[in-house]
Image (cartoon, helix red, strand yellow):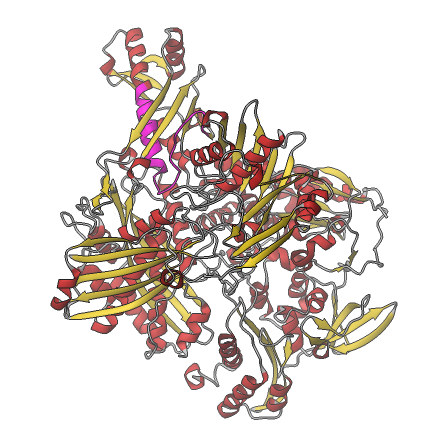
């Protein structure tokens, strides 16, 4: 059937009857015919197509950056889409001015994406930390500048930004000329949008969570169709019940990382988060999507495997539980029927004796797909390893829970002999192959080094690198 | 007049894909070879033509001129006919009502191939005699006689990988039929090359073809020769169908179909005294040219020119061999073969330093070239800044204390190890084909006092438009906002050379200089008549007309009105050609370069010896800008070039399958530097005592040279690895990926 969706694009109410699986970038460039949003790679890896997506939550509009090239327009229903054109004022904003004064744009093709990402950061963040704003534009690739002038521009904005008051941030940003004044009207206008005749197409076998890998792999299959778009409930992603952490399957990477529960449970998660993907990808990609995608190197899957997570699968209101480590049968082959959904994921809370670490090495340290990744949860009391979970990606056809190694480590003493013995067992349990992300020989060595890194990171006073050499 | 960059930050700057489409515009999709080397037995287009929305199909049989777009050597067809020689070689162009339908139709092509042997390795091609052209040798002194005088002789092999340009704007062209010809909006560095190729393929005179270039979304050499095919295809399609035709390559097609920086495999032999003085150097470069010549012969020649980098060596023999393989034709990329040549000699010096047990920086320093010596192709050294930039870098950055800090750090840390390296550069400025060193400019002053400049220079992010405005505003002493740089257009500036070889500002800026001075003389005459003074006493200062040093009542606007009403020509067309350059290709000696650009970088890196990943802590550079015309733009060129050089040396890795298929063909598999992978600290000091009579206002070209500072990162990483694993066997095989680092740490 033909769906009609309503949304606001920049300062204008819009209606679209296009198939919901069409992507937002094509809509902006080819249908609306505004061209500041650029196509650089069509796989979420360059950020030239970055736009902001504003969503009404508790009477406020919250903006996040997304890659419009990977975003189905069905997901913008009832929302505010902001392109570079929607940020322009009569004169340059302090952000634009700052890029100009540092000459932080050469050929200019990537620049609108940088401006959108930078503005998106200021819209949502009261505290200006250079490392944080750097993270928010890290998904924007520039081939000309080498980023040094862009970093200088960001430093300058930091200085200008001191004027912006923390309270009434939107008003302050408007008063200081960062964004146009129409932003103040968006809350009311989103509320007044006409009803869409939109309903979730549960008959489609094309199930789209975040779409950040699906649109890269098979955009042609999604375009022109109405896929089954899965939405989450922005109010409740993550909760604790009976010593279990529950995570809604549609929780995005960013929501997961930012939740108080995860930050308390795994304080270092924020550090890992930045290695995993760019902010626009983290704003879209979902945990369930990462799991069912069954990539042997899915970062969140590797994390959840080490947390010994359990999946809650649902089909026709029938639920079943399945340990994540049993979900992966073979390469891209999973224990899930056609219309079954990963509704939620649960795992035990960590106690004080439990330590968690995640490591990832890729050709480019940040924002790259791993050559090998690994996570560990280890419970140590009085030098005894009471319990342990260990996962590796990139060394087998599936994201691998290291059964043999875990079995060996459990109830052992935590000492150098055992660590060395463990490395031998890891060597036997993994079976990497050579591909574009590295040779088998490299991945084998890297996996073993990664285990040593876990140990050095978690028990720095007990083990040194020299000892493990 | 709004500056370009103000349009960039507001998203108003247009690129080919952003231009408004005329009614009826057809969208093109390139059908290309799936095989790296095969005979085409037959092709069945019938299902493609029947596909929804398809209007026409253009192939070799649609050509009324010749099916040939080769530049230096006529060896490259526009559309393959009987044989394909790389995966992605164009076979036909589908024209459809929208881009999606054109792409869908492409899946219906049926081609029967007879597969032929595939060669991707240049040495294998050489053994089979598959060469683009005969080998070329430069020679100086007598290496054969000198080996006996050397205390040590070292030999080795050096590999350097290719590099995808990854301009953010992919290849694009939009062609519109005109009454008897065609107008093309192309994303090219070489409007005239495009115009000539179209003339040849369509068999119409060049004056029927107008090529217009507004700006490019990055190029880096990748649109010098490789933008031509797409422009010619759309021109042919538009001319034949009498309909506008647009072609924008997807990223996937762009990386598949276009050539990259040449991978090189090289053998060297170096003889030194025990103190590190280099007496003789012999090197053979095997260039992986890909399937067709493209610019490979010129790139290879520049490799030979830069085989000795910044060093004076009395006996040198360098041979370049361009090898034909079944890869896309490799092409220009910032540095144009220079970086590949420099990496080999720096590798040889590094190896020699370990064999001799003296520091590499000592060998580098004592062999730096100086005035009145000769570059080994016969050019006498003048105004050398090699030693000057080196000693300034040592002093300003306190190099000895950086080295001491690294030793201390490495003694105190077991997981992380640091390494340093120094990278001097010397890069020759001028097209090495001397005839290309010409440019012209057309300057108009309009009635309202605003100025329009047309040159052959293409703006691709390097800031050449700003520099033209710099020059014009200096000559006329008027506000920059009065001056506009027009599109690069073959009807306004004819017979232009590519915007390449770092020469855009030098050549075109000098032409603008001549044109503006020409008009200025006329304006002074007009003013002198009005003010009744000698024209020699008239000057313009900040838009005021001065006599001697005092202001007259005349302002710029008044003067332009006066000139107009007194029937004075307010336009000028001027020509510039670089003086005193030549190169004798029989003897391979001459004076090919107007001048050289020098500089020295000090690099420090830290390696995580558990995981093999690394960070570049700092790159501190003393760079020879001459008298910089625009310090902020020049700084951006150094920083940006450095990042590309580092990318080439570290993480950018082209991986091919045995069947010749590029596996790292997307941004998710081919990684270019992101904001986290560039150096944590970059310092650029301007060498301020360098003169250059060839550059506008004593400036020097800046585009390519800084890329080569990145080479030093390789050696800094190797030094860090060696301090963790003293037994490591030294290897010179770029890029130094985290994989190579880890394997070396534990070898």
The one of B721 and B430 positioned closer to us in this rendering:
B430
**Please, which residue is most extreme toward the left here?**
B149
Total label count?
A: 0
**Quarter of the rendering containing residue B437:** top left
Q: Which residues are magenta?
A: B489-518
Instruction: Please say if B20 is above or below B250.
Output: above
Residue B492, quarter of the rendered image: top left
Residue drawn at the location 45% of the way across and 16% of the way down: B448
Residue A329 position, x and y percent, is 71, 77
Q: Position of residue A356 (x, y in %)?
A: 60, 77
Q: Nearer the viewer, residue B266 or B506?
A: B266
Magenta-colored stretch includes residue B516: yes
Q: Quadrant of residue A190?
A: top right
Q: Is residue B665 left or right of residue B582?
A: right
Q: Eyeballing the image, is B118 above or below A38? A: below
Does the magenta run of residues contain B41?
no
Q: Is residue A177 visible?
A: no
Decide: is A150 above or below A13.
below
Question: As drawn, is A251 to the left or to the right of B320?
Answer: right
Residue at the image position 56 percent from the left and 93 percent from the top: A413
Percent coordinates x, y for residue B598 in the rendering: 26, 49
> In percent of the image, x 44 and y 83: which residue is there?
A464
Quarter placement of the C terminus of chain B = bottom left
Question: Closest to the observer: B126 or A9?
Answer: B126
């Amino acid at each position: 059937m033909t769906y009609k969706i309503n949304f606001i694009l920049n300062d204008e109410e819009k209606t679209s009857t296009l198939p919901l699986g069409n992507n937002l970038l094509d809509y902006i460039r080819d249908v609306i015919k505004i061209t500041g949003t650029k196509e650089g790679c069509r796989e979420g890896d360059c950020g030239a197509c970055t736009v902001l997506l504003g969503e009404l939550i508790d009477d406020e509009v919250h903006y996040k950056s997304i890659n419009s090239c990977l975003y189905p327009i069905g997901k913008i229903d009832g929302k505010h889409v902001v392109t570079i054109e929607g940020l322009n004022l009569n004169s340059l904003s302090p952000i634009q001015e700052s890029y100009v004064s540092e000459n932080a744009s050469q050929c200019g093709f990537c620049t609108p994406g940088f401006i959108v990402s930078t503005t998106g950061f200021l819209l949502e963040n009261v505290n200006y930390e250079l490392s944080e704003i750097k993270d928010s534009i890290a998904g924007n690739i520039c081939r000309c500048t080498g980023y040094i002038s862009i970093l200088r521009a960001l430093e300058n904005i930091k200085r200008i930004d001191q004027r912006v008051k923390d309270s009434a941030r939107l008003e302050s940003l408007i008063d200081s000329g960062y964004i146009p004044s129409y932003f103040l009207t968006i809350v009311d206008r989103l509320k007044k949008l006409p009803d869409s005749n939109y309903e979730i197409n549960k008959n489609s076998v094309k199930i789209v969570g975040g779409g950040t890998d699906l649109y890269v792999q098979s955009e042609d299959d999604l375009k022109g169709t109405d896929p089954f778009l899965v939405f989450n409930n922005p109010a409740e992603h993550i909760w604790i019940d009976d010593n279990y952490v529950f995570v809604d399957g549609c929780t995005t990477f960013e929501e997961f990382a930012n939740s108080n529960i995860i930050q308390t449970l795994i304080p270092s998660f924020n550090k890992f988060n930045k290695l995993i993907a760019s902010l626009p990808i983290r704003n879209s990609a979902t945990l369930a999507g990462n799991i069912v995608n069954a990539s042997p190197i899915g970062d969140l899957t590797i994390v959840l495997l080490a947390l010994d997570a359990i999946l809650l699968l649902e089909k026709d209101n029938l639920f079943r539980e399945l340990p994540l480590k049993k979900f992966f049968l073979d390469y891209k082959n999973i224990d899930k029927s056609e219309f079954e959904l990963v509704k939620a994921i649960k795992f035990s809370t960590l106690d004080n004796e439990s330590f968690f670490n995640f490591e990832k090495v890729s050709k480019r340290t940040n924002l790259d797909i791993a050559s090998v990744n690994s996570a560990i949860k280890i419970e140590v009391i009085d030098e005894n390893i009471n319990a342990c979970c260990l996962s590796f990606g990139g060394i087998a056809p599936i994201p691998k829970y290291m059964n043999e190694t875990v079995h060996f480590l459990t109830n052992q003493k935590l000492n150098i002999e055992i660590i060395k013995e463990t490395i031998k067992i890891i060597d036997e349990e993994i079976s990497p192959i050579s591909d574009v992300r590295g040779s088998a020989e490299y991945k084998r060595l890297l996996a073993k080094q990664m285990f040593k890194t876990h140990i050095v990171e978690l028990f720095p006073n007990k083990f040194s690198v020299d000892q493990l050499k | 007049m709004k500056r370009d960059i103000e349009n960039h930050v507001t998203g108003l700057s247009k690129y080919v894909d952003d231009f408004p489409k005329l009614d009826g515009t057809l969208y093109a999709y390139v059908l290309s070879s799936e095989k790296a080397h095969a005979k085409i037995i037959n092709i069945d287009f019938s299902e493609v033509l029947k596909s929804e929305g398809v209007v026409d199909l253009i192939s070799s049989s649609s050509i009324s001129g010749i099916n040939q777009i080769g530049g230096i050597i006529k060896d490259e067809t526009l559309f393959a006919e009987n044989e394909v020689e790389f995966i992605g070689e164009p076979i036909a162009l589908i024209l459809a009502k929208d881009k999606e339908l054109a792409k869908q139709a492409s899946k219906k092509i049926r081609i029967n191939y007879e597969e032929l042997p595939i060669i991707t390795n240049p040495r294998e091609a050489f053994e089979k005699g598959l060469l683009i052209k005969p080998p070329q040798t430069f020679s100086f002194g007598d290496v054969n006689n000198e080996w006996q005088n050397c205390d040590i002789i070292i030999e080795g092999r050096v590999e350097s990988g290719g590099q995808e340009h990854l301009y953010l704007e992919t290849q694009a062209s939009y062609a519109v039929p005109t009454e008897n010809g065609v107008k093309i909006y192309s994303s090219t560095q070489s409007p005239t090359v495009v115009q000539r190729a179209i003339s040849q393929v369509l068999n119409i005179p060049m004056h029927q073809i107008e090529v217009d270039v507004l700006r490019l979304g990055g190029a880096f050499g990748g649109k010098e020769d490789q933008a031509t095919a797409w422009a010619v295809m759309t021109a042919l399609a538009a001319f034949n169908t009498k309909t506008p035709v647009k072609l924008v390559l997807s990223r996937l097609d762009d990386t598949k179909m276009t050539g990259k920086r040449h991978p090189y495999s090289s053998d060297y032999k170096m003889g030194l005294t025990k103190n590190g003085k280099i007496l003789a150097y012999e090197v053979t470069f095997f260039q992986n040219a890909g399937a067709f010549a493209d610019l490979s012969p010129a790139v290879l020649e520049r490799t030979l020119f830069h085989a000795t980098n910044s060093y004076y060596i009395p006996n040198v023999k360098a041979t370049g061999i361009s090898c034909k393989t079944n890869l896309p034709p490799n092409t220009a990329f910032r540095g144009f073969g220079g970086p590949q040549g420099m990496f080999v000699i720096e590798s040889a010096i590094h190896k020699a330093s370990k064999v001799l047990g003296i520091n590499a920086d000592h060998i580098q320093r004592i062999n730096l070239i100086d005035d009145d010596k000769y570059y080994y192709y016969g050019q006498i050294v003048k105004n050398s800044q090699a030693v000057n930039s080196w000693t300034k870098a040592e002093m300003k950055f306190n190099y000895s204390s950086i080295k001491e800090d690294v030793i201390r750090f490495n003694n105190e840390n077991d997981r992380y190890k640091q390494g340093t390296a120094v990278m001097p550069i010397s890069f020759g400025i001028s097209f090495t084909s001397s005839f290309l060193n010409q440019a012209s400019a057309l300057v108009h002053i309009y009635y309202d006092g605003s100025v329009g400049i047309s040159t052959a220079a293409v703006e691709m992010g390097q800031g050449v438009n700003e520099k033209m405005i710099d020059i014009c505003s200096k000559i006329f002493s008027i506000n920059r906002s009065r001056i506009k740089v027009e599109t690069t257009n073959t009807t306004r500036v004819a017979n232009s050379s590519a915007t390449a070889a770092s020469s855009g500002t030098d050549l075109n800026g000098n032409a603008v200089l001549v044109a503006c001075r020409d008009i200025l003389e006329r304006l002074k005459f007009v003013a002198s008549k009005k003010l009744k003074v000698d024209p020699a006493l008239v000057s313009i200062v900040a838009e005021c007309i001065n006599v001697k040093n005092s202001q007259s009542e005349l302002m710029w606007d008044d003067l332009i009105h006066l000139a107009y009403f007194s029937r004075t020509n307010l336009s000028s067309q001027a020509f510039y050609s670089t003086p005193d350059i030549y190169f004798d290709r029989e003897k391979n000696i001459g004076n090919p370069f107007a001048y050289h650009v020098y500089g020295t970088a000090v690099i420090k890196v830290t390696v995580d010896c558990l995981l093999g990943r690394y960070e570049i802590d700092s790159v501190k550079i003393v760079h020879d800008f001459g008298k910089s015309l625009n310090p902020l733009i020049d700084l951006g060129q150094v920083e940006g070039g450095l990042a590309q050089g580092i990318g080439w040396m570290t993480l950018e890795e082209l991986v091919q399958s045995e069947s010749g298929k590029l596996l790292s063909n997307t941004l998710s598999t081919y990684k270019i530097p992101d904001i986290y992978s560039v150096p944590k600290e970059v310092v650029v000091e301007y060498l301020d005592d360098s003169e250059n009579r060839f550059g506008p206002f004593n400036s020097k070209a800046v585009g390519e040279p800084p890329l080569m500072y990145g080479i030093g990162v390789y050696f800094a990483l190797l030094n860090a690895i060696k301090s963790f694993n003293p037994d490591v066997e030294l290897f010179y095989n770029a890029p130094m990926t985290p994989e190579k680092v880890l394997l070396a740490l534990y070898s």
